[in-house]
Amino acid sequence: MASPPADDQDTPTPPQTRERPSRLIDIAVALLFLIADAVIVVVAALLFVMVGMGSAKSSNPSATVHSRDVPVLMWLVVWGVPALAVTGAVVHARLRMPVSAVVQSLFALACTFLAVIWTRMLLS
């Protein structure tokens, strides 16, 4: 059996590493996400204020409080958005895009904060 050439035996094989995207692409993607995430957070906060004002207790003390069930779809939306935001942050970290990962992580924190507020409102 023939042995491999001598020059192939001395060079170790480099580990398979993923090339990271350029810093410019990372910053451009992060800016796009920052704009989209800001719009999403502002709309969610406005919805929270509008729904909160609409369900505020009336000044009539004889009004009865009606308990209502919250649909499962509402819970999926309220807690699904933060879960997707965390997944996006992890994906950008795995893609070695640090600026985008930080922006998505901040968005995930904001979504989690809003989800806690929505949960408290839905349960009250």
Image (spheres, rainbow, N blue to C red):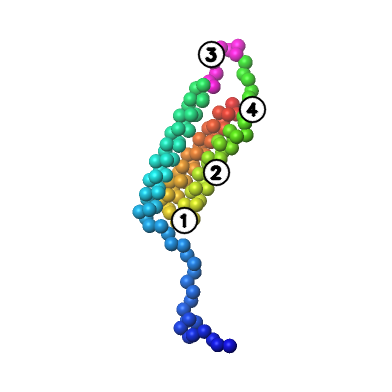
| Residue 2 painted magenta | no
Tell me the kind of residue under disc 4: Asp
Instruction: Report if the CB atoms under discs 3 and 4 are less than 8 Å apart.
Output: no
For mark 4, does the 10 Å Cα neighbourhood hold few (<14), some (14 to 19), or many (20 or more) residues? few
> What secondary structure is found at the residue carrying circle 1?
loop
Residue marked by disc 2: 83
The residues bearing labels 4 and 2 have C-alpha atoms spaced at a distance of: 23 Å
Image side of residue 51 versus residue 27, left or right: right
Residue farthest to the front, as pictured? 1
Q: Position of residue 12 (x, y in %)?
A: 48, 76
Residue marked by disc 1: 95
Magenta region, residue range: 55-63
Tell me the kind of residue under disc 3: Ser
Position above or below: 68 against 39: above
Answer with mark 4 or mark 2, whichever residue precedes in sequence. Answer: 4
In front of the other: 59 or 73: 73
Residue marked by disc 3: 59
Residue marked by disc 4: 69
